[in-house]
Image: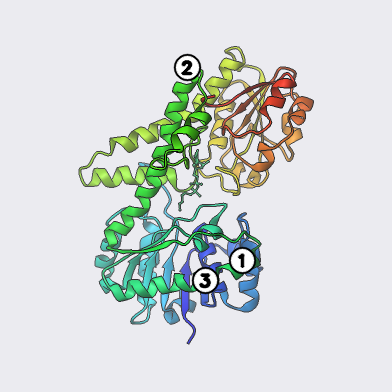
Amino acid sequence: MTTTITVLGAGYVGLSTAALLAQAGFKVYLVEPNPSRLDTIKQGRSFFFEAGLDPIIKLGIDSGNLLPTDSYNIGVPESDFVFSCVGTPDNPDGSSNLAYVYDAAKSAAKLMKPGAVFIQKSTVPVGTGKKIIEKLGLEAGSYISNPEFLREGTALQDTLWFDRIVCGGSDESVLTRVAELYKALEAHRDTIATAAGIEIGSINGSYIATDLNSAELIKVTANAFLALKISFANSIAKLSDAVDADINGIMDAVGADKRIGRAFLNAGRGYGGGCFPKDVSGLISSGLEHGIDLEIMQAAQQVNESMPSYVIEKLKHQLGGNLSGKKIAVLGLAFKKGTSDTRKSPGVKIANLLNTFDVEVLAYDPQALEEAKQDLRRNVLLCTSIEEALVDCDAVVLATDWDELMSLPAQIFANHLNSGAVVIDAVNAYRNHIDLKNLGLDYIGIGR
Ligand code: UDX
């Protein structure tokens, strides 16, 4: 008998998970209340940009294995597993708003058949699973925390070639059943990657079974630690600037120590996105709830918040101490390459901050223009090409590490910018900076 699954919420996690599980041969209902998003998915496409996702959504829809719907009543009653992947927006105080998480659990619990398993994939503060079980009077063993570690931009790759699958709960046999789903996906991963047009990976990850609270804490702790690494690198970058050292070289050498590792030590304009900022503040809130002051995470958060203005201060200094009357382009509005997501994006923050001075700001992104619109100040001019953004500018900020920006020939900058203009590389990854200098432009990075 075919295993039936319902995935609640078609965000980055839900849509990727549903499309992948459908490719592994499961019958997958995907519940999405937003009519325009639902309609796009039904047409075999994603409503956001994620490499490889469109082809497998299309295959899922065409095969009938992926069944998008706006109703819990269609799929949940016949499902063996219900994955909850609903959003957890920020509360004004930085904690997570769990209204969708509770609503989804409540609505699903009413409809689930006996023996069905509820799998929480949304990132929730530690203790949430236990509260849900208690509040809804659920069978404790049927509720599993299965945190998601996929990154936007590499969502399919990360899910198919995972470092670890974490399942937390109180019933070992249920934990094993959930692990079996991922093993089925693992068995099909080469074929799925080929269908998606993404690279075949090589990691053989591990399966970790643990208790509910630990699973919830593993997720936020992992993200908080990565955020900490970035803020640490950014703190050293500021010192590097002060003593004329090179942060990239420093972190290459520091990261060569296998105990430390090079990943997530890239200094620049700081981290953004739907996860790190929220998970750091969520962890701080969880700590406070239990009387633990996570000062180290508060420091990481403060450093991160300081980075966009640090970038602007450096730029101002380079422009002779005055931004007034300048024309400045910001290239890169997505919070990182490979995504159209602009949530908490440093590029957007930098553009908006520049716009609070007497500066004409032009902005460009290869994928994120539409999503950036809602967060950008009205006076920031959106451009549809790099060239359009650069014309007659006194400076340009590179704010996202898109390959097409990082490999842009220096001549393009020289052809369009004013002579002697400043190129500030806020992601420390522009590859042709020597050519820029040879063409008479001023190049600076962060901590370089
Ligand atoms: C993150 C986690 O990596 C992932 O495991 C989890 O499931 C969700 O949160 P994501 O938010 O998609 O993934 O992006 P990630 O690649 O981790 O980057 C987050 C931010 O940190 C980006 O703004 C990125 O530009 C920035 N970053 C990353 C740095 O500034 N320096 C680095 O060295 C690495």
Residue drawn at x 44%, y 76% as measured from the top left = 76
Residue 41: which disc? 1
Q: Crowding at label 1, few (<14), some or many (≥20) Cα neighbours within 10 Å?
A: many
Pointer 1 or 2: first along the chain? 1
Pointer 3 or 2: first along the chain? 3
Distance of label 1 from label 3 (alpha carbons): 15 Å
**Label 3 CB-ligand 1 distance < 8 A:** no
Q: Which label lies toward us, 1 or 2?
A: 2
Quadrant of the drawing holding the C terminus:
top right
Left or right, 440 with respect to 250, comes to right
Q: Which label lies toward us, 3 or 2?
A: 2
Q: Position of residue 117 (x, y in %)?
A: 36, 74
Three-letter amino acid code at the position of disc 3? Leu
Q: Position of residue 155 (x, y in %)?
A: 54, 57
Question: Which of the pair 136/82 is nearer the observer?
Answer: 82
Q: Which label lies toward us, 1 or 3?
A: 3
Question: Which of the pair 269/354 is nearer the observer?
Answer: 269
Residue drawn at x 77%, y 29% as measured from the top left = 411
At mark 2, the secondary structure is helix
Residue 127, quarter of the rendered image: bottom left
Q: Position of residue 15 (x, y in %)?
A: 54, 63
Residue drawn at x 51%, y 18% as measured from the top left = 244
110 lies above or below 32 = below
153 lies above or below 429 = below
Q: Crowding at label 2, few (<14), some or many (≥20) Cα neighbours within 10 Å?
A: few
| Any part of residue 163 in sight | yes
Distance of label 3 from label 2 (alpha carbons): 52 Å
Three-letter amino acid code at the position of disc 1? Ile
Q: Crowding at label 3, few (<14), some or many (≥20) Cα neighbours within 10 Å?
A: many
CB atoms of marks 1 and 2 within 8 Å? no
What residue did someone put label 2 on?
243
Residue 280, quarter of the rendered image: top left
